[in-house]
Image (spheres, helix red, strand yellow):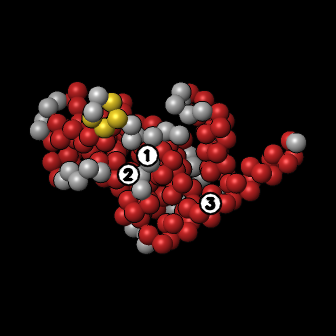
Amino acid sequence: MICLTSTISGISEMERVDRCISDIAKNSGTQALEELYNRTKDAVYGYALSILKNTHDAEDVLHDCYICVWNSARDYTSEGKPMAWMFSIARNLCLMRIRGRNRFSDAPEEDWMQYLEANDSVSVDDRIVLERCLTELSDDEREIIMLHALTGLKHREIAEITERPLSTVLSKYRRALKKLRGLLDEEDGNNG
């Protein structure tokens, strides 16, 4: 899965992301924003796409998110959760976009497939699961699964970002996994 929790040279990816936001706040130029974008764009885009189900809207939210990060970096308080902060921004932008058009629109399957195929960090098995997430899960289930799969956020952090009780996040996560397992078992039975 796409995950931002790896450790390289003793510095975790989250610490690197945190440092980028701190550098942006110190007006260190666009280099820190560029590094932040390169490290987090796939996760932010995938998350926005999981909510909006429209590639064009997800791309707009992706870019708007980094503009908000640039403008709000001074207000960021490091608690070791920079992605939670960024996902909160992305989620709010998604919700504003949805309210603006007052409907969801389906992403053409080929757009989602192209995104997944172009992303080297997503294995074939992961693509199957992510495609199922987009098409078979409820909006709430998809959001929770994508947050966990894209970033490795803990359920407690997902509850904070989505402003849902932890018990709700856990039950929706379990239900979504059960649904996905059932779908994959059904496919295995059809192919076997």
Q: Residue at x 18, y 53 (%)?
A: 77
User: Compared with residue 170, is residue 134 higher up or lower down, i.e. above or below?
Assistant: above
Local crowd at mark 1 within 10 Å, few (<14), some, or many (≥20)?
Answer: many
Q: Quadrant of residue 21?
A: top left
Locate residue 131, reporting x and y percent: 65, 44
Tag 1 secondary structure: helix
Dots 2 and 1: beta carbons under 8 Å?
A: yes
Tag shown at residue 87? 2
Locate residue 59, reporting x and y percent: 46, 39
Locate residue 184, reporting x and y percent: 74, 49
**Rounded to the nearest whole Å, what is the CA distance between mark 2 and mark 1?**
10 Å
Q: Can residue 70 be seen in this view?
A: no
Residue farthest toward the front in the current orientation of the protein:
10
Q: Can residue 142 be seen in this view?
A: yes
Residue located beneath label 3 in the image: 176
Dots 3 and 1: beta carbons under 8 Å?
A: no
Residue located beneath label 1 in the image: 151
Local crowd at mark 2 within 10 Å, few (<14), some, or many (≥20)?
Answer: many
Q: Residue at x 62, y 50 (%)?
A: 134
Tag 2 secondary structure: helix
Local crowd at mark 3 within 10 Å, few (<14), some, or many (≥20)?
Answer: many
Q: Residue at x 62, y 51 (%)?
A: 133
- Quadrant where the image shows the C terminus: top right
Q: Earlier in the sequence, mark 2 or mark 1?
A: 2
Near-viewer residue (192 or 116): 192
Q: Earlier in the sequence, mark 3 or mark 1?
A: 1
* Amino acid beneath label 1: Thr
User: Compared with residue 173, is residue 165 higher up or lower down, i.e. above or below?
Assistant: below
Near-viewer residue (55 or 10): 10
